[in-house]
Amino acid sequence: MVTRQTKSGRGPASTAYVSHVLDACGFPPRMIRCTRLLDLVTTMDPEATMIYLADHVDAGRLPER
């Protein structure tokens, strides 16, 4: 999401900004994200699902070093 602050850098839009943008629809960002994940899983696109989840790696699923 590109905002005035993010267009000049590499950081993500703030949670407060995204929440405010979504106020009118009545859904929190987490619900929209979960719905998107469900769609990716049911369409059997595992690569897209992994790309989408790459920022949240469950340490319990990583192999032992």
Image (spheres, rainbow, N blue to C red):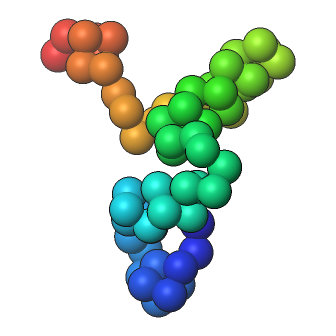
Q: Say which of 7 and 25 sits in front.
A: 25
The answer to whether residue 57 shows anywhere in this view is yes
Q: Residue at x 57, y 27 (%)?
A: 34
Instruction: Work out whether 27 lies above or below 37.
Output: below
Counting from the top left corner in percent of width and height, residue 31 is at: 55, 32
* Residue 26: quarter of image: top right
Count of picture labels = 0
* Residue 58: quarter of image: top left
Q: Residue at x 20, y 10 (%)?
A: 64
Tell me if 58 is positioned left or right of 3 in this view: left
The answer to whether residue 52 shows anywhere in this view is no
**Which quadrant of the rendered structure holds the N terminus?**
bottom right
Q: Residue at x 51, y 44 (%)?
A: 29
Counting from the top left corner in percent of width and height, residue 36 is at: 67, 32
Counting from the top left corner in percent of width and height, residue 60 is at: 25, 11
Q: Residue at x 72, y 25 (%)?
A: 40
Counting from the top left corner in percent of width and height, residue 62 is at: 30, 16
Q: Say which of 55 and 1 sits in front.
A: 1
